[in-house]
């Protein structure tokens, strides 16, 4: 009897894991974007490694962004997260938005979150 | 013991009769139209939607009932016509009988026509109910679509921006020595080209205009038009009922005319039967 219960539990957990493993196009894009930003901010890697990583991320992000804009399932989603992501084009579609601005992904992202050289220079030290 | 047997037989007979009545009742219920169509009918092209509704009706018991009444009406009309055609050939007594038969035939015809009008009305009310139900479902779908339309609009805006810059971005990626074009990118281009070719073929297909697809009319417009047509048919049914009333009036006048003719004939026979003498007739007897 205990074996049967354990088997059922294992089956239920495996099923739940399978469901949670299914990610949408937007989740994949957000994951890849997070990795790109992590590489951008990673102080343990040198410039060349960062450059290579960001180039690879740009290619992946370009594909993932195309997947998101062609994902018809998003149209029937009422999630505010989806609406928020699509409203912030400049930060969600990093690869395409940076190409529009003739900038690298890094420069575009820093500028959009308010960390450009000019903005940093204009800031003042305060206690 | 024989009394007990009688009771059993009577009970069995009663149960049998009640079951027969139940069967008759069920037969009556089956002579209805209960639409078997689901909301999937809304996926059909506009011109086919009404056809699907009519096809569903044609399978119903109500349609069979109407066809049966229609056959009886046709038979009645031909019988009345036949009698009218032969009326001049009969002698006076036979003509009275033939006119009586015509009036009876007309009465049956009016009764059948009234029944047919009731069935027509039932059909139209059922159709109108179905169309209203479909319209309600479509309205709730439209309300949900309105909520989703904000997201769809944002996605469409993003799509137009991305499509404008996509080729430039891919050129930039291709210039990088370490990155090569991804499989997704290659397959995406190929599939988009195929989709574009298919869309062109769909737009230029001759059935596209014939089926009324993409003619600008929404599904709710189409449903409203169908409801309007059904309401118009119901109004016509009202006029048909009035027509039937006039027919019945005319028939009652015919029946009165026949009764009067029959009465007049009887009076003629009665007046011919007996003549009584008057004193004025006998005056010459006394004066000469």
Image (spheres, helix red, strand yellow):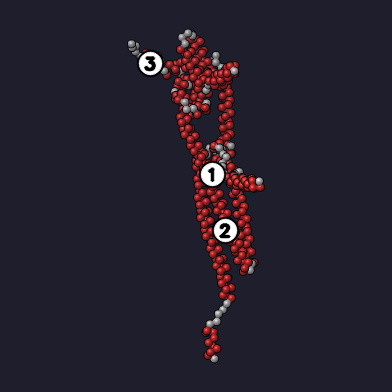
Residue drawn at x 44%, y 24% as measured from the top left: A84
Residue B127 numbered mark, or none: 1
The x and y percentages for residue B55 are: 59, 43
Q: Is residue B116 above or below residue A1?
A: below
Residue annotated with mark 2: B107
Residue drawn at x 49%, y 19% as measured from the top left: A30
Q: Are marks 2 and 1 on the same chain?
A: yes
Q: Earlier in the sequence, mark 2 or mark 1?
A: 2
- Distance from the alpha carbon under mark 3 to that under mark 1: 69 Å
Which residue is at the front of the view, B284 or B183?
B284
Residue annotated with mark 3: A119
Q: Is residue B278 above or below residue B217?
A: below
- The chain that hosts pointer 1 is B
Give the SS element for disc 1.
helix
- Distance from the alpha carbon under mark 2 to that under mark 1: 30 Å
Q: Quadrant of the C terminus of chain B?
A: bottom right
């Amino acid at each position: 009897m205990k074996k049967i219960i354990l088997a059922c539990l294992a089956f239920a957990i495996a099923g739940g894991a399978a469901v949670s493993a299914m990610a949408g196009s937007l989740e994949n894009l957000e994951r890849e974007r997070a990795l790109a930003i992590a590489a951008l901010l990673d102080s343990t890697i040198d410039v060349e490694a960062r450059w290579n990583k960001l180039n690879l991320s740009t290619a992946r992000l370009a594909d993932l962004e195309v997947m998101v804009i062609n994902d018809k399932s998003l149209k029937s989603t009422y999630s505010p997260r989806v609406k928020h992501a699509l409203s912030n084009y400049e930060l969600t579609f990093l690869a395409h938005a940076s190409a529009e601005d003739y900038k690298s992904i890094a420069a575009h992202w820093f500028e959009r979150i308010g960390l450009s050289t000019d903005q940093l220079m204009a800031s003042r030290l305060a206690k | 013991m024989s009394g007990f047997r009688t009771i059993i037989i009577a009970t069995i007979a009663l149960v049998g009769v009640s079951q027969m009545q139940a069967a008759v009742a069920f037969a009556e219920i089956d002579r209805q139209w209960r639409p078997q169509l689901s909301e999937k009918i809304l996926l059909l092209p506009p011109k086919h939607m009404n056809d699907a509704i009519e096809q569903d009706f044609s399978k119903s018991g109500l349609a069979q009932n109407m066809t049966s009444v229609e056959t009886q009406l046709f038979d009645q009309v031909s019988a009345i016509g036949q009698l009218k055609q032969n009326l001049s050939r009969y002698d006076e007594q036979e003509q009275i009988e033939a006119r009586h038969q015509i009036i009876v035939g007309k009465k049956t015809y009016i009764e059948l026509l009234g029944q047919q009008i009731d069935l027509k009305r039932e059909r139209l009310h059922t159709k109108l109910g179905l169309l209203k139900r479909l319209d309600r479902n479509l309205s709730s779908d439209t309300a949900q679509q309105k909520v989703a339309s904000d997201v769809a609009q944002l996605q469409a805006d993003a799509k137009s921006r991305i499509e404008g810059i996509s080729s430039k971005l891919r050129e930039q990626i291709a210039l990088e020595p370490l990155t090569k074009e991804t499989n997704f990118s290659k397959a995406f281009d190929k599939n988009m080209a195929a989709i574009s070719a298919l869309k062109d073929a769909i737009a230029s297909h001759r059935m596209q205009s014939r089926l009324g697809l993409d003619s600008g009319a929404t599904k709710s417009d189409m449903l409203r038009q169908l409801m309007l047509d059904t309401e118009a048919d119901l109004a016509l049914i009202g006029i048909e009922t009035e027509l039937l009333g006039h027919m019945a009036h005319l028939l009652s006048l015919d029946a009165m005319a026949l009764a009067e003719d029959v009465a007049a004939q009887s009076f003629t026979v009665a007046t011919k039967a007996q003549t009584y003498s008057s004193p004025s007739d006998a005056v010459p007897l006394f004066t000469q």
